[in-house]
Image (tube, coloured by chain):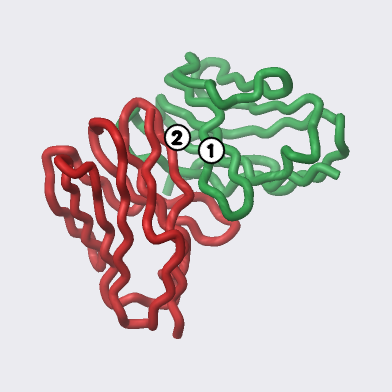
């Protein structure tokens, strides 16, 4: 069964360092999402892509976060510099279209020390 | 964009009982989806109900949608310990956003 792949699964980084997460969506899925989830809360949408275009990044802290989806396939989310408050689970998801069901990866657990 | 608001925030029931959780939203939608999240894992899609549907079943899941009240409910019948998880609704417009969810605990 096709899956959304994310790496790494776990990442520990020091404050002020740069960190990057990678996501490979299910083949053929045009819509890709990045979420941040703090323990005990729901996932917060950071950025949504339709193919290679950003549909929404209104909640992305653009002073330190960036996201790209070159060629409309896999995607990278970067944080530079990392802050203690960035410790969270980062989830990637993809869907065939804007309104269809989304499939999630296992997430990357980030700890900033 | 909008996110659903799930109620209750937490629910504990005995194994075998039915669990009902509710979702409210604010504006018009294309469809409404329910997801489950086990601790420390990604979300898993459970069921999608279109805006012109009123009820949908999938196995032990029953979802209702009332667009006039802008609300939905998810019923899990004959609960099992494996149903312990957080449940999120996603009222679908162009974005996929989530509320804080309902944390369901099934007591063996």
Which residue is drawn at the image coordinates 25% and 68% (left, top)? B60
Q: Report the side of B31 relative to A26 (left or right).
A: left
Q: Is residue A91 above or below residue A58?
A: below
Which residue is drawn at the image coordinates 64% and 46% (left, top)? A89
Q: Position of residue A36 (x, y in %)?
A: 60, 39
Q: Is residue B76 above or below residue B48?
A: below
Q: Colour of chain B?
A: red
Q: Position of residue A84 (x, y in %)?
A: 80, 40
Q: Report the side of A8 relative to A25 (left or right).
A: right
Question: Which residue is at the front of the view, A22 or B65?
Answer: B65
* Residue under label 2: A94
Q: CA distance from mark 2 to mark 1?
A: 15 Å
Label 1: how many Cα within 10 Å (few below 14, some 14–19, many 20+):
many
Q: Name the mark nearer the viewer: 2 or 1.
A: 1
Q: Colour of chain A?
A: green
State the mark number for residue A44.
1
Question: Which residue is at the front of the view, A76 or A87?
Answer: A87
Label 2: how many Cα within 10 Å (few below 14, some 14–19, many 20+):
many
State the mark number for residue B36.
none
State which quadrant residue A46 falls in: top right
Q: Residue furthest bottom?
A: B108
């Amino acid at each position: 069964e096709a899956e959304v792949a994310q790496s790494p699964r776990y990442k520990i980084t020091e404050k002020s360092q740069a960190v990057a997460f990678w996501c490979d969506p299910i083949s053929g899925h045009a819509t890709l999402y990045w979420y941040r989830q703090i323990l005990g809360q729901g996932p917060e949408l950071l950025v949504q892509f339709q193919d290679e275009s950003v549909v929404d990044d209104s909640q992305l802290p653009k002073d330190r976060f960036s996201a790209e989806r070159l060629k409309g396939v896999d995607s990278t989310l970067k944080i530079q510099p990392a802050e203690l408050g960035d410790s969270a689970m980062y989830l990637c998801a993809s869907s065939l279209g804007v309104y269809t069901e989304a499939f999630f990866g296992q997430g990357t657990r980030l700890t900033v020390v | 964009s909008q996110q659903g608001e799930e109620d209750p925030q937490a629910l504990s029931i005995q194994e075998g009982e039915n669990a009902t959780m509710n979702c409210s939203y604010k504006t018009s939608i294309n469809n409404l989806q329910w997801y489950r999240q086990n601790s420390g894992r990604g979300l898993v899609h459970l069921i999608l109900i279109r805006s012109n549907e009123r009820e949908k079943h999938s196995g032990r899941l029953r979802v209702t949608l009332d667009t006039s009240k802008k609300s939905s409910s998810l019923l899990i019948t004959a609960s099992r310990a494996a149903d312990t998880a957080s449940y999120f609704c996603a009222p679908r417009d162009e974005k996929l956003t989530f509320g804080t969810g309902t944390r369901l605990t099934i007591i063996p």
